[in-house]
């Protein structure tokens, strides 16, 4: 960890910038795309439960990230956490390698998913065929990389500017829903809406897969640990602020839509928010709303790409990944090679994949190693380290970690058999690659044998 701590990255982000970057990462095109899907899965206004469940999981897991991020504020986030938890000279090597292995695939998938969603909403303004949409999504990825190609203090200022536009848009949508709210439409529950049968919980699980996708990003600031001022205070605060703030906004936004557009109509809408605004203010306002949604999508991709670019960088600086990822810009002090490589892969993915499958694939690929691995790991680390190692300690320990583990297991199974098996296969292949690499490098676990 010493190499990472002493890296050239600049501590230039305060609490405001940290919270803004987290919230930008969380609010992307996701909520505007998944709103109708969540209604479909739950078949009625009871879909609000899926948003509440997503918020609960985020709070529980956010406590784990807060404790780890405050104790080990370094570039790379989970890479550093997993390596320290499971032993930097033993199993930690495997877990941290698997995280980077997955990141090379899932980080570009996350960026690509936002770009694909952006291009789909763009068609509300300009009708485009499949090829045209792919061109838009690819150009968006290129624009994000160009905008991020600068020093971190400038990036922090850009994030605050983008954040203002994001929050203003969400508040406008909520205001519109509140002033035109019809409770008869909003609470038009179908017969058997709360029968708590297997079908109910299966629908809740599938809907929660979608909602948790929109919450992902509350931990983004941990990937920038080496660039945060007073990280022992600002990392936990920014995580809690972003989760609570976004949860309130999501619930109010979903309720606003349900109070204006009947749920049976809303669940089949491709541009639900544009339809919502059009119903209230007319077609011109719907165009403005769509432009603002595209602003939000762009802002989220900006934040996500920034955080993810630091993970392979941290591993490369630590000697556990390809050396090229450790390269930083000679004047602006940011990991330019990592940004360019991940951006290139995201560009390719944005041209190849569809959105709905990408969401399940992202979660299935990450849950076991990163989320469950960390929640179990915090309890292991607590048993190994003195109390002074943790400047922040989660409330009601170990309850939040245990709840997070159970909820992540349920969510993993809810991604569907195809994606769950795929996630396991990615781990197995990554482990094989790790052991082959370790054998030829005469590294753990082959050090003594060879």
Image (tube, rainbow, N blue to C red):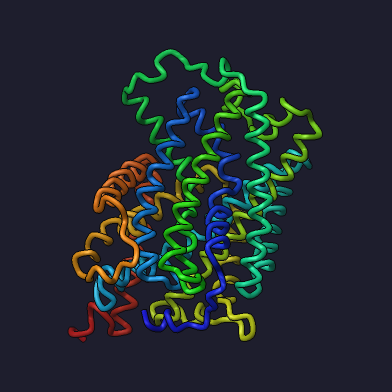
Residue in the image at 42% along x and 50% along y: 363
Left or right for 233, reference 309: left
- Residue 78 against residue 217 in the figure, above or below: below
Asked where in the image residue 392 lies, by quadrant, the reply is: bottom left
> Is 115 rendered above or below residue 267?
below
Q: Could you say which is closer to the camera, residue 102 or residue 46?
A: 46
Quarter of the rendering containing residue 431: bottom left
Residue at 69% x, 30% y is 275
Position of residue 189 relative to residue 240, above or below, is: above
Residue 238 at what x, y percent from top left? Answer: 48, 57
> Going by the picture, which residue comes out furthest to the right?
284
Q: Residue at x 36, y 43 (%)?
A: 411
The residue shown at (70%, 62%) is 143
Q: Quadrant of the N terminus?
A: bottom left
Specify whether 427 is left or right of 163: left
Q: Nearer the viewer, residue 121 or 347?
A: 121
Give the farthest residue toward the top. Answer: 191
Confirm whether residue 424 shows in the render. Answer: no
Figure quadrant of residue 157: bottom right
Residue 170 placed where, x, y %? 63, 41
Quarter of the picture containing the C terminus is bottom left
């Amino acid at each position: 960890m010493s190499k990472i701590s002493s890296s050239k990255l600049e501590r230039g982000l305060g609490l405001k910038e940290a919270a803004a970057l987290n919230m930008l990462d969380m609010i992307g095109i996701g909520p505007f795309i998944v709103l109708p899907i969540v209604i479909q899965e739950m078949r009625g206004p009871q879909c609000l439960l899926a948003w509440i469940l997503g918020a609960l999981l985020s709070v529980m897991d956010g406590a784990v990230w807060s404790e780890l991020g405050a104790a080990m504020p370094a570039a790379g986030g989970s890479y550093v956490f997993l390596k320290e938890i499971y032993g930097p000279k033993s199993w930690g090597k495997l877990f941290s390698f698997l995280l980077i292995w997955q990141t090379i695939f899932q980080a570009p998938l996350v960026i690509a998913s936002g770009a694909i969603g952006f291009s789909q909403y763009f068609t509300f303004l300009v009708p485009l065929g499949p090829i045209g949409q792919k061109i838009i999504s690819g150009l968006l990825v290129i624009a994000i990389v160009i905008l991020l190609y600068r020093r971190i203090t400038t990036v922090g200022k850009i994030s605050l500017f983008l954040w203002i536009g994001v929050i203003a848009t969400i508040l406008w949508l909520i205001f519109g829903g509140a002033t035109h709210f019809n409770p008869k439409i909003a609470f038009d529950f179908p017969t058997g809406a709360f029968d708590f049968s297997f079908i109910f919980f299966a629908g809740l699980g599938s809907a929660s897969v979608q909602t948790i996708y929109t919450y992902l990003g509350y931990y983004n600031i941990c990937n920038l640990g080496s660039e945060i001022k007073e990280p022992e205070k600002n990392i936990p605060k920014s995580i809690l602020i972003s989760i609570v703030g976004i949860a309130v906004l999501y619930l109010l936004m979903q309720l606003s839509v349900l109070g204006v557009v009947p749920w049976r109509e809303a669940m089949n809408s491709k541009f639900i928010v544009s339809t919502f605004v059009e119903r209230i203010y007319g077609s011109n306002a719907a165009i403005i709303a769509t432009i603002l949604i595209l602003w939000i999508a762009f802002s989220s991709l900006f934040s996500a790409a920034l955080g993810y670019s630091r993970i392979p960088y941290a591993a490369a600086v630590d000697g556990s990944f390809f050396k090229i990822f450790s390269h930083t810009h000679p004047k602006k002090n940011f990991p330019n090679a990592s940004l360019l490589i991940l951006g290139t892969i995201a560009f390719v993915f944005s041209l190849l994949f569809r959105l709905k499958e990408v969401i399940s694939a992202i979660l299935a690929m990450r849950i076991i190693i990163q989320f469950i691995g960390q929640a179990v790991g915090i309890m292991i680390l607590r048993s190994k380290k003195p109390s002074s190692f943790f400047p922040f300690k989660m409330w009601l320990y170990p309850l939040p970690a245990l709840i997070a583990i159970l909820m992540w297991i349920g969510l993993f199974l809810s991604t569907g058999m195809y994606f769950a098996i795929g996630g396991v296969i990615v781990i197995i292949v990554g482990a094989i690659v790790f052991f082959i690499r370790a054998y030829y490098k005469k590294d753990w676990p082959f050090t003594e044998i060879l």
